[in-house]
Amino acid sequence: MGVWESSGHTSERNALNFALIFAVALPAVLFTSSMSASCECQTSAINFAFTARAQCTVAAGISSPNAEFLCQAASLHPLALLSVIFLLNVSVLFWLVSLVQGSTWLIDPYWTLCPPLCVAFLAVHPQIAPVAALTHPRVFNALLLLVLWSVRLTHSYLRREEFCFGAREDWRFAEMRNEWGSLWWLVSLPLAYLSQQVLLVGLVVPYYVVLLSAEPWSFGDTGALLCCAAGLTIAYAADSELYEFMSHNALRKEKGEEQLPLLNTGMWYLCRHPNYAGEQMFWWGVAAFAAFLGWPWTAVGTVLNSLVLLRVTHMTEARMLAKPERKHVYKAYQTSTPMWLPTGKLFLVGSD
């Protein structure tokens, strides 16, 4: 993460940033709730003709002056409208907030919130809501898994940040800010926000397929569920081990003791980035739900996310190697331990 700026839990700044997390979502929430209440649309079948428009009319008893506009918006393809809302309410609005605050911190907590919010938008969209069977085993389990994913990542974020909001920004964006200097205000829009839109919207595309599918539960669904569950378990365990390691090192520092240079036990014995491995397992499991329904190409967002995370992994390791006190031991760790997949390590557990 970036450089820490002191901000107590009860400080005015912390309270304002906490309120900001909720306030910035209000435009999209109000728009979506008004559209859902005001419009009746021809129900959608799975299609990716983004330029096609559905027939939407103002619902009986609605006299709002904005109803016609809302129904025109509702006639757009649900994923196209989602992209427009994300562009305006997240990419542009968060960018403007960052220019005022001088920090991109707000996108961090929204990484945990955007996927469930995006899927909730799809579920209540007037083209999808009438046919989305939320009690169908596939839909129910896929939504439950997403909620659990969000809870896990939100818990990890809050624990890591010690419930301080906006005290620091992601260290990668902090480095970019230093590299770009006076141009950062401009390039931060594509680098910190538009790029996040491509990834976050791309990751939830399989849910569009899941919401509109009524095929019976299959062995493929079971495999997808197990993949997601395993990913959640691995990521949670890895995050908890890392948190305990960092907390223990903080105590050692307070006591004037030498800090441990490396975490290489538990999940971190099996591979160097088990938290990333678990995260990828979850999203590939989500993509598998749609793939087994006949839409494997909807995993394109998952592929992009994996490629970006691979780049982030290399950036993280370069940062570790840049620290003289860790360079030697981390190079040895790289030699003995795989990056993501615990190839060979699983067979060594308990063999000592």
Image (cartoon, grey):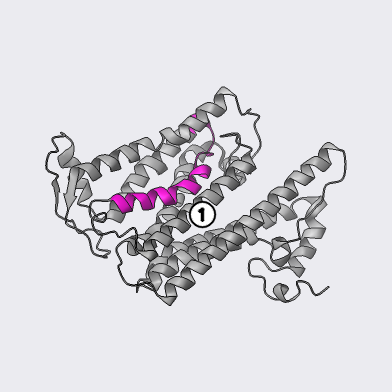
The three-letter code of the residue at mark 1 reads Trp
Give the labeled residue for mark 1: 149
Q: Considering only vertical position in the picture, is 217 above or below 203? A: below
User: Residue 178: percent from the left, percent from the top?
Assistant: 60, 40
User: Residue 127: percent from the left, percent from the top?
Assistant: 23, 55
Give the residue at x 47% y 30%: 19
Q: Nearer the viewer, residue 137 or 351?
A: 137
User: Residue 161: percent from the left, percent from the top?
Assistant: 62, 40
**Residue 310, visible in the rendered structure:** no
The mark tally for this picture is 1
Q: Nearer the viewer, residue 271 or 199?
A: 271
Would you say 115 lies left or right of 48 here? right
Would you say 216 lies left or right of 2 here? left
For the C terminus, the quadrant is bottom right
Give the residue at x 69% y 69%: 338
Q: Secondary structure at mark 1?
A: helix
**Residue 126, visible in the rendered structure:** yes
For the N terminus, the quadrant is top right
Q: Is residue 109 magenta?
A: yes
How packed is label 1: few (under 14 Cα within 10 Å), some, or many (20 or more)? many
Give the residue at x 33% y 45%: 85
Q: Quadrant of residue 66?
A: top left
Helix, strand or loop for the magenta stretch, by majority: helix
User: Residue 49: percent from the left, percent from the top?
Assistant: 24, 63
Residue furthest toward the right? 257
Would you say 261 lies left or right of 338 here? right
Q: Considering only vertical position in the picture, is 228 above or below 79? A: below
Q: Is residue 278 magenta?
A: no
Which range is magenta? 99-124
Give the residue at x 59% y 60%: 233
